Amino acid sequence: MVGIVIVSHSAKAAEGIRELAMQMASPETPILAAGGMEDGGIGTDAFRIQTAIEEADRGEGVLLLVDLGSAIMSAETAIDFLDEEIDVRIADTPVLEGAVSAAVTASSGGDLDEVLAAAMEARSMQKLS
């Protein structure tokens, strides 16, 4: 199963988005939150992201959803830190909507390309008609 990691500058935001995504996914879907700094402050920590990637990996790859631009730099650094070869992708999509879409697709057995595509569809979702 594809793993999902929510990366946010806020631990509370990452946990909240994870909670919502888990409501749409099967319980065994590996969705982890990697938000905030170790001391509880605002920011992103490449080592926390690396650990979350390793925990989320089930051998079929991991999708990262990030909130702000500097989270991308931390995520890229985390990928560079990985000891093992894990197929990791970063989705350029709204983090909440993308996480929910990715969770549904991952829990229904989608591969990493399909999970990424589902997350990316969130870029064009309209909330009002």
Image (cartoon, helix red, strand yellow):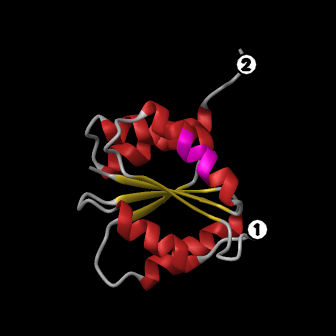
How far separated are the C-alphas under marks 2 and 1?
32 Å
User: Eyeballing the image, is 1 above or below 57?
Assistant: above
Q: Which residue lies furthest to the front in this view?
A: 39
Which amino acid type corresponds to the residue marked 2 in the rendered image?
Leu
Q: How crowded is mark 2: few (under 14 residues within 10 Å), some or many (20 or more)?
A: few
Q: Which residue is drawn at 32% across and 62% down?
A: 57
Q: Could you tell me which secondary element the residue under label 1 belongs to?
A: loop
Residue 67 located within the stretch drawn in magenta: no
The dot on residue 128 is 2
Answer few, some or many: residues within 10 Å of disc 1's Cα (few below 14, many 20 plus, some between 14 and 19): some
User: The C terminus is located in which quarter?
Assistant: top right
Q: Hey, which residue is sitting farthest top in the picture?
A: 129
Q: Which residue is drawn at 29% across and 80% down?
A: 84
**Do we see residue 118 in this rendering?**
no
Amino acid beneath label 1: Ile
Work out whether residue 41 or residue 101 is closer to the camera in this orientation and state it: 41
Residue 72 falls left or right of residue 111: right
Mark 2 or 1: the one toward you: 1
Picture residue at 28% right of the left edge, 41% below the top: 110
User: Residue 102 at x, y = what percent?
Assistant: 44, 42
The picture places residue 52, in percent across and down from the top left corner, at: 45, 66
Residue 19 appears anywhere in the view: yes
| Residue that mark 1 sits on | 42
Q: In this view, does 87 lie above or below 101?
A: below
Considering every residue shown, the one lying at the far right of the view is 42
Residue 123 picture quarter: top right
The picture places residue 9, in percent across and down from the top left corner, at 70, 63
Secondary structure, magenta segment, majority class: helix
Instruction: Please provide the residue range marked out in magenta.
Output: 15-19
